[in-house]
Image: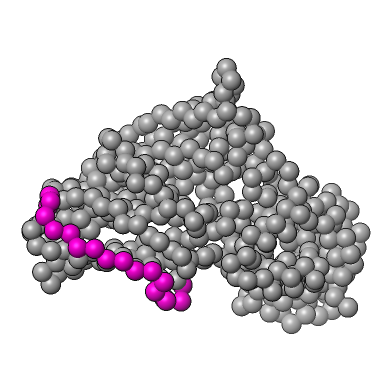
């Protein structure tokens, strides 16, 4: 008999009884603490930082400098709002520091963002967000960019950084970075897209999608062929388009529409190639289509359905598996909202936590196979992080043993590695 069977008779109650105590949430009270607690590491929260920033290198007619556009995106839920008449308002300081390869500060820019929403519910939204941008010009070289966001109300600060390399602009033909956006609106101050996909994730496949870029040509009166192609993870070409550009300025910006009738949930690669007078240059970017409500940790919907076996009934999994591919994402979200409701949340927080635990189990207990299928992985998914883990060896044959304590649930679980290969099996469960 499966050692987990006794716990699966009342899956919903057990999983969320444990979750209600063991899951760390990002409530307003908790966010007001140590800023480091807000940072989602790959080991503990598996979601990246709670804000993201994206850099794009843009072209100018001057080969000795490049425009660096820096965008940030942070969900409403991460900010502290205050009531202002009939609205709720949050204020954010957006600061950028850029150091060169010799650690010399070359750019320091600060911008202030105010965001207003009409209802208290929107202040806790994970779907709605604040978007900000800064632009600066830099010569070719290696740089380290640090972005800091400071909530003006709570004084919490979040920091993220990355290194970038700026290469010299080609003399005859060149393309900038590709910027994906749902709109052709531009910012007046820097002629950059107003609403770029900072996270590279699309939650509405039916929405408009455009690829924006700069094109530099030394011979603008010669024909330039622009080709756009989209590939799935199997490197199958699922969309392509082309256009010819002639005349105009040496350096100009373009939007190319992307019509993805065959695109559904998954990752895609988009490539733009420019060809002129036997010269060609190519740029690429990636994006992901994700049905709204699915956690970003889910890469494969079929696998996500199979990973429900720990808490779901076999008949429900079978029903989901038999659905057409185009309906699986939506029905998986519906399943969670029906069986594990999370009232008042635009994205089901219980679903997010579950799949974060699955990913955490794979990282910790994978060892060449699916960590979520192991005994320790399944206990971690069901009950969350243990209060304490005691490691010891059985004296007679030095068999490694782990004892997981859940003090708040009055439970403990004993795992033994009988063969010494890290394959710990559940041998006793006490409560």
On the image, the x and y values in percent for residue 178 come to 32, 56
Q: Is residue 362 visible?
A: no
Question: Along the horizontal axis of the image, is 184 left or right of 215?
Answer: right
Residue 326 located left or right of residue 69: right
Q: Is residue 407 magenta?
A: no
Q: Quadrant of residue 412?
A: bottom right
Which residue is found at the position 67% from the left and 33% from the top? 29
The residue at the point 69 percent across, 74 percent down is 322
Residue 55: give x, y in percent of width and height.
35, 49
Region rendered in magenta: 233-250
Seen in the picture, residue 136 relative to 205 is either above or below; the reply is above
Q: How many marks?
A: 0
Left or right of residue 237, residue 368 in this image: right
Q: Is residue 149 above or below residue 349?
A: above
Which residue corresponds to the image point at 60% horizontal and 33% vertical from the top-left?
Answer: 123
Colour treatment of the image:
one colour
Image location (x, y in percent) of residue 71? 39, 43
Query: Where is residue 425, by image quadrant?
Result: bottom right
The residue closer to the viewer here, 7 or 182, is 182
In what quadrant of the picture does the N terminus appear?
Answer: bottom right
Assess whether residue 238 is covered by the magenta stretch. Answer: yes
Query: Which residue is at the front of the view, 38 or 71?
Result: 71
Above-or-below relation of 167 to 35: below
Q: Residue at x 52, y 65 (%)?
A: 264
Q: Is residue 357 left or right of residue 110?
A: right
Whether residue 258 is visible here, answered yes or no, is yes
Q: Position of residue 228 (x, y in %)?
A: 31, 65
């Amino acid at each position: 008999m499966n050692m987990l069977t006794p716990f699966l008779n009342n899956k919903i109650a057990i999983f969320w009884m444990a979750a209600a105590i063991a899951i760390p949430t990002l409530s307003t009270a908790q966010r007001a603490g140590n800023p480091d607690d807000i940072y989602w590491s790959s080991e503990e929260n598996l979601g990246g930082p709670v804000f993201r920033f994206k850099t794009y290198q843009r072209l100018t007619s001057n080969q000795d400098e490049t425009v660096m556009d820096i965008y940030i995106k942070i969900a409403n839920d991460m900010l502290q709002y205050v009531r202002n008449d009939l609205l709720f308002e949050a204020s954010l300081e957006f600061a950028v520091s850029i150091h060169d390869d010799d650690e010399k500060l070359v750019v320091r820019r600060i911008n202030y963002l105010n965001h207003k929403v009409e209802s208290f519910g929107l202040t806790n939204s994970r779907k709605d967000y604040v978007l900000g941008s800064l632009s600066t010009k830099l010569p070719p070289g290696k740089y380290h960019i640090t972005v800091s966001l400071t909530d003006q109300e709570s004084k919490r600060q979040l920091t993220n950084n990355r290194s970038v390399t700026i290469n010299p602009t080609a003399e005859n033909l060149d393309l900038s970075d590709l910027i994906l956006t749902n709109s052709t609106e531009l910012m007046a101050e820097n002629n950059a897209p107003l609403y770029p996909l900072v996270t590279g994730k699309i939650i509405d496949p039916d929405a408009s999608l455009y690829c924006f870029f700069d094109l530099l040509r030394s011979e603008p009166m010669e024909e330039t062929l622009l080709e756009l192609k989209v590939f799935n993870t199997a490197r199958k070409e699922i969309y392509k388009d082309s256009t010819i550009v002639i005349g105009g300025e040496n350096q100009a910006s373009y939007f190319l529409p992307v019509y993805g009738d065959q695109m559904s949930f998954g990752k895609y690669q988009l490539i733009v190639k420019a060809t002129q007078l036997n010269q060609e240059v190519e740029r690429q970017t990636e994006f992901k289509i994700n049905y709204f409500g699915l956690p970003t940790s889910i890469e494969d919907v079929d696998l996500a359905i199979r990973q429900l076996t720990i808490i779901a009934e076999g008949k429900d999994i079978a029903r989901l598996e038999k659905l057409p591919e185009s309906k699986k994402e939506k029905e998986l979200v519906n399943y969670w909202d029906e069986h594990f409701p999370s009232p008042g949340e635009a994205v089901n927080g219980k679903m997010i936590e579950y799949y974060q635990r699955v990913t955490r189990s794979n990282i910790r207990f994978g060892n060449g196979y699916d960590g979520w299928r192991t005994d320790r992985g399944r206990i971690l998914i069901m009950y969350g992080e243990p209060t304490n883990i005691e490691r010891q060896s059985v004296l007679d044959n030095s068999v490694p043993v782990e004892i997981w304590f859940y003090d708040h649930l009055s439970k403990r679980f004993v795992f033994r590695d009988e063969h010494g290969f890290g394959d710990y099996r559940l041998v006793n469960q006490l409560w």
